[in-house]
Image (cartoon, rainbow, N blue to C red):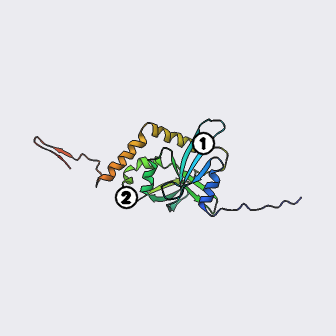
Amino acid sequence: MLVEMKAVPTMENPSTLISARLSEFCTVNELQGNYGIDFFCSCFSGKAAEGREFFVQYKDTKKVSEDEESISLELKTASVRRWFKKRSITFLVYADSEKGLIYWVDPFVQLFERIKELSKKQDTIVLLVPKRNQLQGGKEVPAAMLKRMNRFDHFLFTGVIERTSMDMENFSKEDYFSDELIVEEDENTLDIS
């Protein structure tokens, strides 16, 4: 018996590749325009009455470097600041169309550590996307992504996201940052610089 094998077609367009992979476990809506997010995804499980929603950003990123463990992507801080205004997590995604691989990261872990870099005075920021976070096909939301969604929800409901967003606004209004005390007191005056 002779079996003819056909090569799996590769998708050269990253948008098509990402959309196809995500649509295996959720409804994917591609957003038009540049708002810091490219897809809005809704996941509904037969086991759960409630759905899960998340955003995906892949456009407006520039691959800066790559090593064995991660890919460094540069993106606009204006886009990143918008993620803090959303009520669902935004995953940063990189698609390697040649290999048919998609990598993702919950960027908030890195962003909380580098909040001062998100001021309006800085145009770009570089984030790492670990290669171990591959978006595989399947009918269920990947467990690691679901865990990150739950973590984001916790931050949202405890006010961490809102406070961080307010901090970014405060940082953006200042010309400088200081980790030192900038108030000087003496007996007669109080100088605030």
Q: Earlier in the sequence, mark 1 or mark 2?
A: 2
Asked if the residue at tag 2 contacts the one at tag 1, i.e. Cβ–Cβ closer than 8 Å, the answer is no
Compared across the picture, whether 9 is left or right of 36 comes to right
Amino acid type of the residue tagged 1 in the rendering: Ala
Which is more foreground, mark 1 or mark 2?
Answer: 2
Q: Which residue is mark 1?
A: 143
Nearest the eye: 93 or 15: 15
Q: Give the position of the N terminus as an image quadrant.
A: bottom right
Residue 89 in percent (x, y) is at: 51, 46
For numbered disc 1, what is the local secondary structure?
helix
Residue 99, label in figure? none
Nearest the eye: 29 or 143: 29
Residue 23 in percent (x, y) is at: 64, 50
Nearest the eye: 2 or 35: 35
Nearest the eye: 51 or 141: 51
Compared across the picture, whether 143 is left or right of 110 comes to right
For numbered disc 2, what is the local secondary structure?
loop
Q: For residue 139, which quarter of the picture? A: top right
Residue 11 in percent (x, y) is at: 65, 62
Residue at (42%, 52%) from the top-left corner? 81
Residue at (29%, 48%) from the top-left corner? 179
Residue ranking furthest to the right: 1
Q: Which residue is mark 2?
A: 122
Residue at (63%, 58%) from the top-left corner? 17
Are there few (<14), some (14-19), or many (20+) residues within 10 Å of tag 2?
Answer: few
Compared across the picture, whether 191 is left or right of 75 comes to left
Amino acid type of the residue tagged 2 in the rendering: Gln
Residue ranking furthest to the front: 32
Residue at (55%, 41%) from the top-left corner? 147
Spatial CA span between label 1 and label 2: 34 Å
Are there few (<14), some (14-19), or many (20+) residues within 10 Å of tag 1?
Answer: few
Residue 180 in percent (x, y) is at: 26, 47
